[in-house]
Amino acid sequence: MTVASVVVVGGGIAGVSTVAELRKAGYAGELVLVSADAVPCDRPPLSKEYLAGSRDLESIALQPSQWYAEQQTSLVGGVVAVAIRPDTGEVELDDGRVLTADKIVLATGGRAARPAVGSPSHVLRDVTDADGLRTSLVPGARLLIVGAGLIGAEVASTARGLGAEVVLVDPLDPPLAAAVGIEVARWLHGLHADHGVEAVTATVETLLETPTAVAAQLSGEPDSREFDAVLLAVGLVPETGLADAAGLETSRGVLVDAGQVTSHPSVLAVGDCARLRDHHRAEHWEAARLDGARAAATILGSEPPPAAAPWWWSDRYGLHVEGVGEMRSPDAAHENVVRGVLGEPPFSVFTLRGERVIGAVAVDDPNAVRAARRLIDRQVGVRASDLADAAQNLRKLL
């Protein structure tokens, strides 16, 4: 069946990537992108440069405004889809309009998780959230950040740069050990104290709004603490409302096959809202971008992009952190190899299973992660001594 029209619902990186990949591959049919934002924006800067005020809205747009016309794509911005009807290909918008298409691509992302702890708090998922949080980040403001993962750590760094007093709370000690390995995780978490952030291993039991502050009760502490603002950075919940109402299969995300197709053949799902059956959801920018490329290939009936090791990045306190693949603690089957000196950037750490690299993390050493990704994808055998030798050109190991 020829696909004459496609409606993509959601203006994040997954949705925009779907549009871009369709046109890049020569798709000539009608293409509509529905975005809650008037102009689709990139989300990584929201916790960093945009929050700090060093970049504006135009500079974080995923594509220039004229790009959509150049791609012969109708951008329907500032509206939200309220229903999809897979059997008829209809997408109903909150302004009353109804769009129709042969294929619907759900790229609805996720909403910030909000634990039931009481007082209203900030979250950080979109430009409006970032604008609201920025008003609280004035010199001397007392900010509590709940969750010391990537977003929480990035906001702590930004807030300190703006002069706020920051307390960062997480029950894990150290956070991010599963992503970067325990040694690197300890060092990264220690950076907070080095920059004046108080990192507390605890949970937040209650938040109570008072006339002058927010009182937070942390586990293990006899008295509550007062803050001017609270940010909840404890993950996201996939936005499956449209899929649920349409009768699509969902379970911790909209369930899809390897081609991003949902339980209805006319509907695909990409990005944070989607979950490959029998797998965990991937919530990183690169994973969402590749979902869009796979969905485009499915719609066109072409070969999907080759599988690649998952890659992510983050920034804090002027340092750039990247990771790829799967980091593991040393055991009988796994070895961790340090290139450089751990804690003295630039450095990198590789996880080996036998002679195969399965993961890597690097600080201010993006070339190491780039090489590691190729070693993982190509399943190239390497010696630990070659990885550890800082004088060794990693590209020669490929």
Image (cartoon, rainbow, N blue to C red):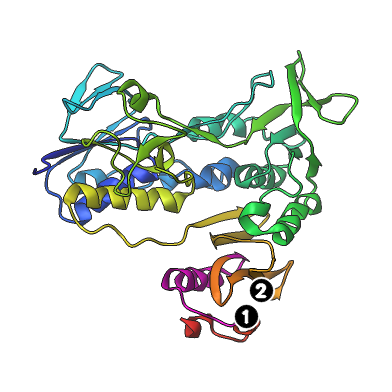
- Using the rendered view, name the quadrant where residue 37 is placed: top left
Depth check: give the residue in front, 325 or 83: 325
Q: Is residue 304 left or right of residue 31?
A: right
The CA span between labels 2 and 1 is 6 Å
Quadrant in the picture for the N terminus? top left
Residue 344 found in image quarter: bottom right
Looking at this rendering, what residue extends furthest in the top direction?
211
Q: In the rendered picture of this protein, how many numbered marks are placed on residues? A: 2
Please say whether residue 64 is visible from this viewpoint: no
From the viewer's perspective, is 386 left or right of 8?
Answer: right
Residue type pointed to by label 1: Ala
Is disc 1 placed on a helix, strand or loop?
helix
Determine which of the numbered discs, if any, sits on residue 44 in the image: none
| Image-quadrant location for residue 215 | top right
Where is mark 2, residue-wise?
Answer: 337
Q: Position of residue 297 (x, y in %)?
A: 23, 52
Q: Quick one: 232 or 76, which is closer to the camera?
A: 232
**Picture layout, residue 373 above or below residue 207:** below
Residue 384 - label: 1
Residue bounds of the magenta highlight:
360-383
Residue 350 image point, x, y percent:
61, 70
Question: Of helix, strand and loop, which one carries label 2?
Answer: strand
Residue type at tag 2: Val
Q: Can I make out residue 254 in this image?
A: yes
Q: Is residue 382 magenta?
A: yes
Q: Residue at x 35, y 42 (%)?
A: 270
